[in-house]
Amino acid sequence: MFESSSYTSESYDSFRDYFRGVAEEYAIPLLDYTEMSLCEDESLFLDSVHLNLKGARIFSDSLANDIKALGFICK
């Protein structure tokens, strides 16, 4: 992705693995967007971490749809 990030792929993997383990242990859903194609499109980011308006809308729509699919929203 972006070279300016101070995080390594190993730290992301460790972080993601930890939360996957917690979610599995407590049988709760985990929505993981780290492999989302949006993450590879630099035109959707302000910098190496923050989405711009277009990226935020795409991500928010995806998140809302996933939460709705889990049955947490009744509408």
Image: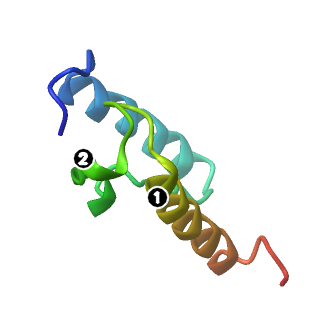
Q: Residue 14: image x %, image y %? A: 31, 29
Q: Which residue is mark 2?
A: 42
Q: Which residue is mark 1?
A: 54
Q: Secondary structure at mark 2?
A: helix
Please state if 58 lies on the left or on the right of 38 as rendered.
Answer: right
User: Where, quadrant-wise, is the C terminus in this rendering?
Assistant: bottom right
Q: Which residue is found at the position 24% from the left and 47% from the top?
A: 42
**Residue nearer the viewer, 23 or 53:** 53
The residue type indicated by label 1 comes to: Lys
User: From mark 1 to mark 2, how far is it between C-alphas?
Assistant: 11 Å
Badge 1 crowding class, 10 Å Cα cut-off, few under 14, some 14 to 19, many 20 or more, is few
Which comes before the other along the chain, label 1 or label 2? 2
Up/down of 13 relative to 68, above or below: above
User: Where, quadrant-wise, is the N terminus in this rendering?
Assistant: top left
Dividing the picture into quadrants, the one containing residue 38 is bottom left
**Residue nearer the viewer, 24 or 52:** 52
The residue type indicated by label 2 comes to: Glu
**Residue nearer the viewer, 41 or 16:** 41
Please state if 25 lies on the left or on the right of 3 as rendered.
Answer: right
Q: Residue 41: image x %, image y %? A: 24, 54
Q: Which residue is found at the position 25% from the left and 22% from the top?
A: 5
Badge 2 crowding class, 10 Å Cα cut-off, few under 14, some 14 to 19, many 20 or more, is some
Q: Residue 39: image x %, image y %? A: 30, 51
Q: Residue 26: image x %, image y %? A: 63, 49
Q: Secondary structure at mark 1?
A: helix
Please state if 55 lies on the left or on the right of 39 as rendered.
Answer: right
Q: Which mark is residue 26?
A: none
Q: Which residue is found at the position 36% from the left and 38% from the top?
A: 17
